[in-house]
Image (spheres, rainbow, N blue to C red):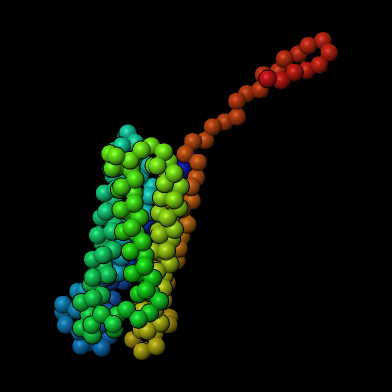
Amino acid sequence: MKPTDSLLLLTRVSATVVAILVITWALYFTTSFHPTHTLSQRDLIYSVLHPLLMVIGFILLSGEAILVHRWLPGSRKKKKWVHLWLQGLALTSGIFGIWTKFQGRDGVVANFYSLHSWLGLFCVSLFGAQWLMGFLSFWHKGEVRMTRIRVLPWHVFLGLYTYGLAVVTAETGLLEKLTFLQTKGVVLKRCNESMIVNGLGLGLAMLCGIVISTAISPKQYQTTPATKVVYSDTMCLTS
């Protein structure tokens, strides 16, 4: 198995673990999303949707889009199409995930006061600008080749930076939520839910490192060509 294939396998395993953990947390421990028992069913649905959309829809999908050129067979144009649409789906999930927080009963200000909320708005806005830049640079028929070549390094850098920022934002959200629940006495410091949330944070950190490592790893591994030895009467020459 090639090194890139091993990294892709690790990515799939990590992403699956993260998906299972966030689904378990959001659907099984629903009392954590309405600790005061005063939320309506509508508010509860929005609260549960937020981590599902931001982790599975935004982070996991964007990670798959980053690695499209590694795992998808076919032409370069096909890979670019899939990359574009996966990133578009991730962006849609991110926008809708933030929209769920705007539906809180206490209004917008009550849900956008923390570092997590500010990072989330900045991250999705940057992701949207990055997606638009990629669309105009790589799909607009009027773009010249040299312009695309100049933009490509920035496109790659901003893509990886935004992906890492999304994971950092999710980590701050998990810390904020768990700290709030433990402070209010809703969740114990040592319980199954705390282990799941901490495991989710650890899984996201591992997934981020694997995705970025896979994205920047060499695409081909070529062996050094054999050295030809030529002997003469006076010296040994290599070519």
Q: Quadrant of residue 226?
A: top right
Residue at the spot 25% in from the left edge and 75% down from the top edge = 101
Looking at the picture, how far across and down is residue 47, in whole percent? 25, 75
Query: Eyeballing the image, is 177 above or below 156?
Result: below
Q: Quadrant of residue 35?
A: bottom left
Q: Which of these two is toward me, 50 or 196?
A: 50
Looking at the picture, how far across and down is residue 143, in whole percent? 33, 40
Looking at the picture, how far across and down is residue 6, in whole percent? 46, 45
Looking at the picture, how far across and down is residue 81, in whole percent? 28, 43
Q: How many numbered marks, from 0 up? A: 0
Residue at the spot 29% in from the left edge and 80% down from the top edge = 111
Residue at the spot 27% in from the left edge and 70% down from the top edge = 98
Q: From where the camera sits, is residue 89 visible? A: yes
Q: From where the camera sits, is residue 207 visible? A: no
Q: Classify residue 202 as left or right of residue 229.
A: left
Q: Which of these two is toward me, 155 or 10?
A: 155
Q: Which of these two is toward me, 66 or 195?
A: 66
Q: What is the quadrant of the C terminus in the image?
A: top right
Q: Quadrant of residue 27?
A: bottom left
Q: Residue furthest top?
A: 233
Q: Residue furthest right?
A: 234
Residue at the spot 31% in from the left edge and 37% down from the top edge = 77
Q: Residue furthest left?
A: 41
Q: Classify residue 211 as left or right of residue 221.
A: left
